[in-house]
Image: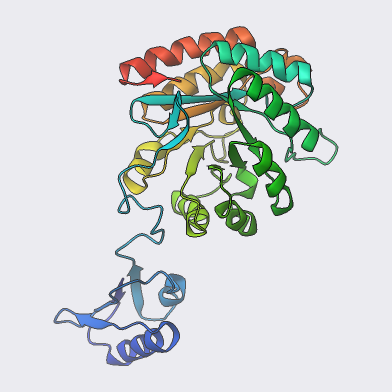
């Protein structure tokens, strides 16, 4: 860590900062340069409150030499891969994974119909919500354990894996029992108790970016899961809230190459929630693959107009088949296989 002072040779401030570092954080420090304007703090500085130091009068800037997320950092390893079964590995350089299914599990018939056609299109991971975080309390909130049972039964029928969301610590045991991937939604990205519990799970965790979170905040949320011992974290870019009103969320595809430099974790993109309209989903999905994402998660429903949640952004069977066809072309051009 480097602490730069506004004035040269400000010995009073230097002494104050060094004593503070030693007393509060047990951190050693030394002066760099002839002008005595820079205090260097070597070693692990993750426990030091950067904002506290920045607030001190006479301090110009405080910068960490290393990122505050150690376990999620690219410095730890080159790439994490998560193998679900023989046909599907998330993070594999040669594959682009598609996760598809309805926003919400509504009935056995609806789920089976959806799973049948997405599996026919080569999809190996079935998504569906049994617990639904909705903006209003009167909207459909999911079928709970009954929905989880339907997901497991249907996925097993077609030889697929299950991705579904846990909204609370209390739901985690139940979700872990039925799911192959535990999803943590955007609204819970900074639910630290839930992140800690997810870190103790034996299943991979798909962590969606918060509605207004920076990349550093997102990676620090992943750090909570990694710190508790779960190495299998998948990052999901699903768009952020901006001033734009035409799209549901602003899809930040620029985050993908940035994340590639910052972290070893697999990165997938959710074009459905960002677009908000089914007719735009395929373009966003193709762009995600082209920019280097490890996969996409797409909402599809046999009859979107009857969907109990997110109907406007859900692809029909025909739209999904066409989207798969287009994504396959982009994936092939990128030297990858769509699975």
Q: In percent of the image, x 74 and y 52: which residue is there?
A: 170
Q: Is residue 321 left or right of residue 338?
A: right
Taking depth in this image into account, of 332 and 198 the one nearest to the observer is 198
Q: Is residue 248 above or below residue 111?
A: below
Q: In percent of the image, x 48 and y 41: which residue is there?
A: 235
Q: What number of labels is visible?
A: 0
Residue 123 can be seen in this image: yes
Taking depth in this image into account, of 263 and 155 the one nearest to the observer is 155
- Check the image and name the residue furthest to the right: 138
Q: Is residue 275 left or right of residue 104?
A: left
- Check the image and name the residue furthest to the left: 34
Q: Position of residue 86 (x, y in %)?
A: 45, 26
The image quarter in which residue 10 lies = bottom left
Q: Is residue 55 above or below residue 198?
A: below
Residue 246 can be seen in this image: no
Q: In percent of the image, x 45 and y 73: which residue is there?
A: 49
Taking depth in this image into account, of 224 and 174 the one nearest to the observer is 174
Q: Is residue 23 above or below residue 124?
A: below
Q: Quadrant of the N terminus?
A: bottom left
Q: Position of residue 83 (x, y in %)?
A: 45, 34
Q: Position of residue 9 (x, y in %)?
A: 23, 87
Q: Position of residue 283 (x, y in %)?
A: 48, 18
């Amino acid at each position: 860590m480097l602490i730069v002072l506004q004035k040269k040779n400000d010995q009073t401030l230097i002494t104050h900062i060094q004593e503070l570092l030693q007393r509060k954080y047990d951190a050693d420090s030394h002066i760099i340069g002839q002008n005595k304007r820079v205090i260097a703090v070597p070693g692990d500085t993750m426990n030091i409150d950067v904002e506290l130091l920045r607030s001190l009068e006479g301090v110009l800037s405080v910068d960490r030499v290393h990122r505050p997320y150690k376990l999620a950092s690219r410095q730890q390893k080159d790439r994490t891969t998560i193998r679900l079964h023989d046909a599907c590995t998330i993070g594999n350089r040669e594959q682009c994974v598609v996760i598809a299914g309805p926003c919400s599990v509504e009935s056995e018939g609806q789920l089976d119909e959806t799973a049948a056609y997405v599996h026919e299109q080569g999809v190996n991971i079935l998504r569906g919500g049994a617990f639904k975080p909705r903006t209003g309390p009167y909207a459909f909130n999911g079928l709970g354990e009954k929905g989880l049972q339907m997901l497991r039964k249907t996925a097993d029928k077609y030889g697929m894996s299950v991705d579904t969301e846990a909204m609370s610590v209390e739901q985690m045991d139940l979700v872990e029992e039925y799911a192959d991937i535990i999803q943590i939604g955007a609204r819970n990205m900074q639910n630290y108790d839930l992140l800690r519990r997810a870190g103790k799970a034996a299943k991979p965790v798909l962590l969606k970016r918060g509605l207004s979170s920076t990349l550093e905040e997102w990676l620090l949320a992943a750090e909570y899961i990694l710190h508790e011992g779960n190495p299998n974290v998948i990052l999901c870019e699903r768009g952020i809230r901006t001033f734009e009103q035409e799209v549901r969320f602003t899809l930040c595809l620029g985050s993908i190459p940035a994340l590639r430099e910052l972290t070893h974790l697999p990165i997938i993109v959710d074009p459905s929630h960002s677009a908000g309209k089914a007719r735009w989903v395929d373009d966003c999905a193709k762009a995600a693959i082209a920019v280097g994402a490890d996969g996409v998660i797409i909402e599809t429903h046999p009859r979107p107009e009857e969907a109990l949640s997110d109907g406007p952004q859900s692809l029909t069977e025909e739209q999904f088949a066409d989207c798969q066809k287009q994504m396959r072309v982009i994936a092939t051009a990128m030297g990858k296989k769509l699975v």
